[in-house]
Amino acid sequence: MNPIYSMTGFASQRGAVENGPGFTLAMKSVNHRFLDLHMRLPGYCDGLEIQLRRVLKELLRRGHVEVSLQVERHTTAQIQLNTELLNDYIEAFRKAAELHGLANEPDLNAMLRVPGMMSVESSVGAEASSDLDTAVLALIPEVVTKLNEGRAAEGAALAAELRASMGRLGAFGEEMVGLRNGVREAQFERLRARLTELTDGVAVSEERVLSEAAVLAEKSDIEEEIVRLRTHVARFIALLDEGGELGKRLDFLLQELNREANTMLSKTSAATGENSLRITELGLEMKAEIEKAREQVQNLE
């Protein structure tokens, strides 16, 4: 059996560049229809981002995956002053002071706080950046393995819940089987009484009653839906046994199960009697169980 992965997980691992800075690589994933990669990397890692995307597309299938890289600052950093912007501010200040006859001088502290006046640039060279790329890429398999370990554990828990859910759906269907005959008998007697009432006591042939009962039974019988429900439940469990990437296929089966539940409710909506009411209750319980299962399946890869 192949492992069943949830799309929810988290993993992180610390690494280091030889004779260089340390770093922490982290991955966080949540459910998504497709593989959706989001990178949070230092500004000088554009080349690394392209390589990470290529590698992760081969290792992951579905999910919204956030990849973050934090590099320890062992490199030297320099404060850069935007002298052109500073000169423009000073010149504008003095022109305004002269225009209004003021003797004030510009406040240097205030000007240095102007956005864009000062910046910090890290002196990461091309060689150091290349070494960082190599070290990060070498750590990817280990981080993905840790991520998948957590996702597999949650996937196994979801699969166990889904098996239990299918067991309950199957039990609902079997209870419906036991109630069908009672529903038919109640409908037959109701039809006989109705025909007697409409014909004002005139005798109605048994053949006519049976003919009308057959038409009514055909319209309200749910045998085909129960057979299909059994088939879908069996297929669902078989896919869980098979494992692997099956979220979309399970979701499709749940749509089919929901369709069968809706048809059962539609066919039995006009029926009366205790058995009919119980079948309606079972149909509603089926729909609630299917909706719960769909929420869980949304998290499977």
Image: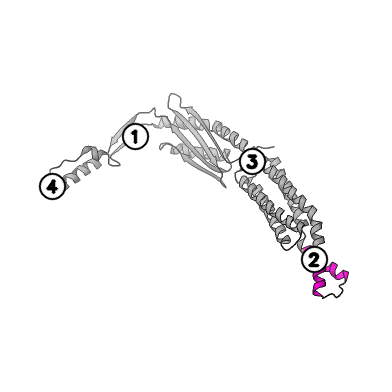
Q: Nearer the viewer, mark 1 or mark 4?
A: 4
Q: For the residues marked 1 and 2, what is the alpha-carbon distance in whole angstroms?
A: 87 Å
Q: Going from the N terminus, do you reach mark 3 or mark 1 first?
A: 1
The type of residue carrying mark 1 is Glu
Which of pointers 1 and 4 lies earlier in the amino acid sequence?
Answer: 4
- Report x, y in % for residue 85: 25, 42
Classify mark 4: helix, strand or loop. Answer: helix
62 magenta-colored? no
Q: Tell me the crowding category of disc 4: few under 14, some 14 to 19, or many 20 or more residues within 10 angstroms, Cα based.
A: few
Nearer to us of marks 4 and 2 is 2
Rendering coords of residue 147 (x, y %): 56, 35
Residue 190 has which mark?
2
Alpha-carbon neighbours of circle 3 within 10 Å: few (<14), some, or many (≥20)?
A: many
- Color style of the picture: one colour
Q: CA distance from mark 1 to mark 4?
A: 37 Å
Q: Quadrant of residue 43?
A: top left
Q: Residue at x 82, y 61 (%)?
A: 185
Residue at mark 4: 98
| Magenta stretch, residue numbers | 189-218
Sooner in the amino-acid sequence: mark 4 or mark 3: 4
Tell me the quadrant of the picture where the N terminus can be found: top right
User: Which residue carries the number 1 mark?
Assistant: 121
The x and y percentages for residue 244 are: 65, 40
How far separated are the C-alphas under marks 4 and 2? 104 Å
Looking at the rendered structure, the secondary structure element under dot 1 is strand
- Quick check: can you spot residue 197? yes
The disc at residue 158 is 3
